[in-house]
Amino acid sequence: MAPAKAAAKRPVPTFDHLRKKQPLERIVRIALNDEVATAYHEASEAAGKAELALKAVEAQAQRRNGSAGPDTERAVAAARAEFEEFKAAAEKAHKALAAETVEVRFRALGRKAYDELVRAHPPKDVAGEDGKVKKSTDPYEYETFAPALVAACCVEPEMTVEQVQTLFEEWNAAEVMELWVAALSVNTQRRVVEFGNFSNGTRG
């Protein structure tokens, strides 16, 4: 039995290594034209259906092997031509969508700056069912913290809190949530790298 290959040596970490770690980033792609985005999704779906139809016709022709006649060959050729047509339309729609899409980049602030921002937006006390004011259990006041966090960690494009608030007022809830989740996750989640040894199923 051949000897197992020795695992590649990893560098011994130093403080300088850790200081070189880049801040976590997230990118959100925003389609500026909904009609163009819808056209792409429809063209992509049509191309997918045409591809499935082509595979079905090809599979039928393969099952017939040598008994496939001219009708079968014409059916395969027609299905392939239709797929190529829908594929070309999808590619054209994709290029149109790419021209109408921007990337919004978020970068982690660092723990200290993030904690300071949280403290700058303390949660408001809430009134209970008995009418008594109770201390909120929320970590911050969402209405003010969310636009402040988006503005603080959005590096492309740079925006003021007022500009972010304008987007929060004009965009729908799902679109606003996409920006908020990206800003929050880049500051509160981590990226873990796992090296798998797929020959024996172990990780190291």
Image (tube, rainbow, N blue to C red):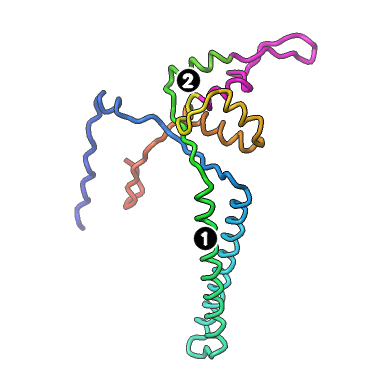
Residue 130 inside the magenta-drawn segment: yes
Callout 2, which amino acid? Tyr
Q: Please tell me whether residue 129 is drawn above or below residue 30 in the rendered image.
A: above
Q: Nearer the viewer, residue 120 or 196?
A: 120
* x, y percent for residue 201: 36, 49
Q: With 57 as the anchor, is 4 left or right in this view? A: left
Q: Please tell me whether residue 115 is drawn above or below residue 40 in the rendered image.
A: above
Q: Residues within 10 Å of mark 1 (few under 14, many from 20)?
A: some
- Find the magenta span and give its range: 122-151
Q: With 175 as the anchor, is 24 left or right in this view? A: left
* x, y percent for residue 3: 19, 53
Q: Secondary structure at mark 1?
A: helix
Name the image quarter holding residue 177: top right
Q: Give residue 44's mark.
A: none
Q: Please tell me whether residue 93 is drawn above or below residue 152 in the rendered image.
A: below
Residue 12 inside the magenta-drawn segment: no
Q: Nearer the viewer, residue 194 or 155?
A: 155
In whole angstroms, how far apart are the C-alphas of marks 2 and 1?
Answer: 43 Å
Q: Which residue is mark 2?
A: 114
Q: Which residue is mark 1?
A: 92
Residue depicted at x 52% and y 80% = 77
Q: Nearer the viewer, residue 25 or 64?
A: 25
* x, y percent for residue 126: 71, 14
Q: Quadrant of the C terminus?
A: top left
Q: Nearer the viewer, residue 81 or 48?
A: 81
Q: Please tell me whether residue 8 is drawn above or below residue 95 in the rendered image.
A: above
